[in-house]
Amino acid sequence: MNNEIKLFCPATVANVACGFDVLGFCLDSIGDEMVVRKTKEKGICITKIEGYDLPLEATKNVAGVAAIAMYEHAQPDCGFEIEIYKNIKPGSGIGSSAASAVGIVFGINELLGRPYNKTQLTYFAMKGEALASKSEHADNLAPALFGGFTLVKSTLPLDILEIPTPKELFATLIHPQIEIKTSEAREILPKEVSLKNATTQWANVGSLIHALHTNDYKLIHRSLEDIIVEPYRKQLIPHFDDLKFAAMQAGALGCAISGSGPSIFALSKGKDIAKRVEKAMKSMYSKTDIAYNTFVSTINTKGINIINP
Ligand code: ADP
């Protein structure tokens, strides 16, 4: 059995418009890399982080916290050291901390001969995510581990559903270079919702799931609507309405905030339209004085994967 593994830890989009805190999908154009190595010395040690300035101390890093949770459960007779090569900017809204949490639990599991299934791995990774967002949630973790679209039916007990991905679906992402604290994005949300809005929202979630199962792109278009969270959170993202309008005019099926923002995603049928949406987003945001970057990605149906040496 190998003593070392190198991984691609993908970025993810949580919420997917109507599915606040439960839906997510996996990207493949961007992700971190991670090396996990068995050591004779017991314990968890993060030896290197490149790309962004994050704590090496295991208890202050989501990868370390997730690793410790799993390590305490597995009680192996070895230790693990971790190298993290970050490409996903922390706080960009595309699951930077989730990529690290998923990477470490997946890596350790492989090196131990796969004693845990993916749902159990998600449980350990949630302990790490809690460090970043103060709450245990799995809407970025599940798509990073399972790939494709996922729905977290419940976190207690953890129940994750894998939803099929229509083949021609492409994502376009824009990341305005502004900072939104996850805590601020949570505080701005209403504590209660009206029954009328709740009804509309769960109709949209149900129809989106049906559309993904039946490759019904027109229904995806009609379902990608968030009337509960977006009206509040969009206030934190300058020019959100103009950007969404530009994406929809360019042919996107839908456009919404990725996770708690500031990244915004659009879904399109076919790569050409996704590229056209990217162009429209760029042309709109270039009129502002906010720096940004964009990319187009297929939906990554495999999730986290091992990079061949
Ligand atoms: P995103 O908006 O990309 O989803 P997150 O909310 O996932 O960002 O997490 C970012 C927060 O988690 C930052 O405060 C960051 O300092 C902290 N953090 C701790 N460890 C890590 C890690 N290994 N990778 C990314 N962020 C981490």
Image (cartoon, rainbow, N blue to C red):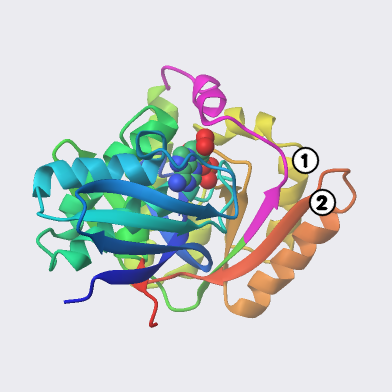
Mark 2–mark 1 distance (CA, rounded to whole Å): 8 Å
Where residue 227 is drawn, which disc sits there? Answer: none
Callout 2, which amino acid?
Tyr
The crowd level at tag 2 (other Cα within 10 Å; few <14, some 14-19, many 20+) is many
* Segment tinted magenta in the rendering: 173-193
With 59 as the anchor, is 185 left or right in this view? right
Which percent across, then down, holds residue 192? 41, 18
Along the viewing direction, whichever of 243 and 184 lies nearer the viewer:
184
Which residue is at a point 42% across and 54% down the rendered structure image? 99
Q: Is residue 287 visible?
A: yes
The crowd level at tag 1 (other Cα within 10 Å; few <14, some 14-19, many 20+) is some
Where residue 285 is drawn, which disc sits there? Answer: 2
Check if mark 2's residue and mark 1's residue have beta carbons within 8 Å.
Answer: yes
Q: Which residue is mark 1?
A: 239
Q: Residue furthest top?
A: 191
Callout 1, which amino acid?
His
Along the viewing direction, whichever of 52 and 128 lies nearer the viewer:
52
Q: Is residue 188 magenta?
A: yes
SS state under label 1: loop
Q: Residue furthest bottom?
A: 308
Which percent across, then down, holds residue 37? 30, 63
